[in-house]
């Protein structure tokens, strides 16, 4: 192998790695955390129900159906609170990817599990 071919086959040490050598992406795992999706869904539906509760307000037909309470408004506010709790949970307990040492440790489970 000539010197030029040898230099081309070796990359710089700080070059990004690919394949199995690449470190796991913490940004992608945090983005697709199921808690974020659930918080988003609760937030969107909570906003819709809250707006519906405010707009329909004290409509006598709706109040008669729900026993005298504005159920859209109450449920919308509750869903917004639940969505906010999920966001707090994601912020206080972020995902922690296992280190290569933790992945290499043998476990006490029986074979095939």
Image (spheres, rainbow, N blue to C red):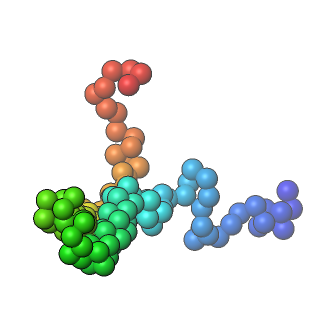
On-image quarter of the N terminus? bottom right
Q: Residue at x 57, y 50 (%)?
A: 20
Between residues 104 and 89, which one lies in front from this camera angle?
89
Between residues 31 and 82, which one lies in front from this camera angle?
82
One can see residue 102 in this view: yes
Between residues 39 and 21, which one lies in front from this camera angle?
39
Residue 46 location, x and y as percent? Answer: 30, 68
Q: Residue at x 24, y 76 (%)?
A: 57
Answer with left or right where residue 107 lies relative to residue 25: left
Instruction: Name the outermost residue toward the top.
Output: 111
One can see residue 43 in this view: no
Between residues 24 and 105, which one lies in front from this camera angle?
24
Residue 7 location, x and y as percent? Answer: 77, 67
Q: Which residue is drawn at 49% across and 59% down?
A: 23
Answer with left or right where residue 57 lies relative to residue 111: left
Quadrant in which residue 71 is drawn: bottom left
Instruction: Name the outermost residue toward the right.
Output: 2
Quadrant in which residue 37 is drawn: bottom left
Quadrant in which residue 29 is drawn: bottom left
Q: How many labels does the image show?
A: 0
Q: Which residue is drawn at 83% across and 63% down?
A: 5
On-image quarter of the C terminus? top left
């Amino acid at each position: 192998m000539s010197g030029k071919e040898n230099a081309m086959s070796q990359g710089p040490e700080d070059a990004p790695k690919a394949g199995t050598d690449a470190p796991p992406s913490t940004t992608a795992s945090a983005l697709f955390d199921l808690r974020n999706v659930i918080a988003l869904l609760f937030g969107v539906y909570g906003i819709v129900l809250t707006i519906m509760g405010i707009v329909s307000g004290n409509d006598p037909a709706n109040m008669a159906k729900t026993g005298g309470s504005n159920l859209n408004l109450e449920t919308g506010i509750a869903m917004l609170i639940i969505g906010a709790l999920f966001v707090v949970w994601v912020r206080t307990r972020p995902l922690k990817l296992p280190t290569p040492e933790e992945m290499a440790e043998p476990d006490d489970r029986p074979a095939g599990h």
